[in-house]
Image: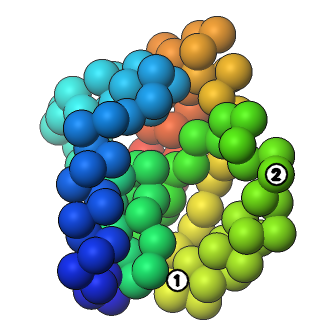
Amino acid sequence: MRAPVLTQKRAKSLRRTMTPPETALWSRLRQRQPGRPAFRRQHPIGPYILDFYCSDRRLAIEIDGIAHNDQSDRDARRDVWLRDQGIKVVRIPAVDVLRDPDAAAVFVWSLVSPQ
């Protein structure tokens, strides 16, 4: 689904100002290797922007920081909308990414590896 122009512009802006946990995970996910599908960062879909998105697996990875504690209802509505579009959403706490970004990347790769 194509995102509105304003959502696309916001996604471009977010790519320039990623949070430290997003940057730590992106530095690992961006390293493409044979047999691994590609991820996009701050990818707009419909009215939403996904932290990371793998189009091959229709998988969204969301890094949840402190701000997400106050918006759980919004996140739930967003997740339902994404599921209705056939996109699976996996949420990873930002503290887990900061604590061990390599383990977070391994976890994400395990979600997209061929079964």
Q: Position of residue 1 (x, y in %)?
A: 33, 88
Q: Residue furthest top?
A: 99
Residue drawn at x 26%, y 50% is 13
Question: Can see residue 12?
Answer: yes
Q: Position of residue 64 (x, y in %)?
A: 66, 41
Horizontally, is 85 left or right of 39 in the view? right
Note whether 4 is above or below 36 in the view shown: below
**Relative depth, front residue between 47 and 83:** 47
Identify which amino acid the numbered label 1 is placed on: Gly
Note whether 88 is above or below 53 in the view shown: below
Quadrant in which residue 8 is drawn: bottom left
Q: Position of residue 88 (x, y in %)?
A: 58, 68
**Relative depth, front residue between 80 and 36:** 80
Pointer 2: what residue? Answer: 70
Residue drawn at x 37%, y 25% is 23
Instruction: Tell me if mark 1 has few (under 14), some (14-19) or many (20+) residues whose alpha carbon lies within 10 angstroms of its own.
Output: few
Q: Secondary structure at mark 1?
A: loop
The mark lying in front, picked from 2 and 1, is 2
Q: Are marks 2 and 1 in contact (CB under 8 Å)?
A: no
Residue drawn at x 30%, y 23% is 27
Horizontally, is 31 left or right of 11 in the view? left
Q: Position of residue 86 (x, y in %)?
A: 52, 83
Q: Secondary structure at mark 2?
A: helix
Question: Can see residue 103?
Answer: no
Identify which amino acid the numbered label 2 is placed on: Asp
Tell me the tag on residue 86: 1
Residue drawn at x 46%, y 72% is 48
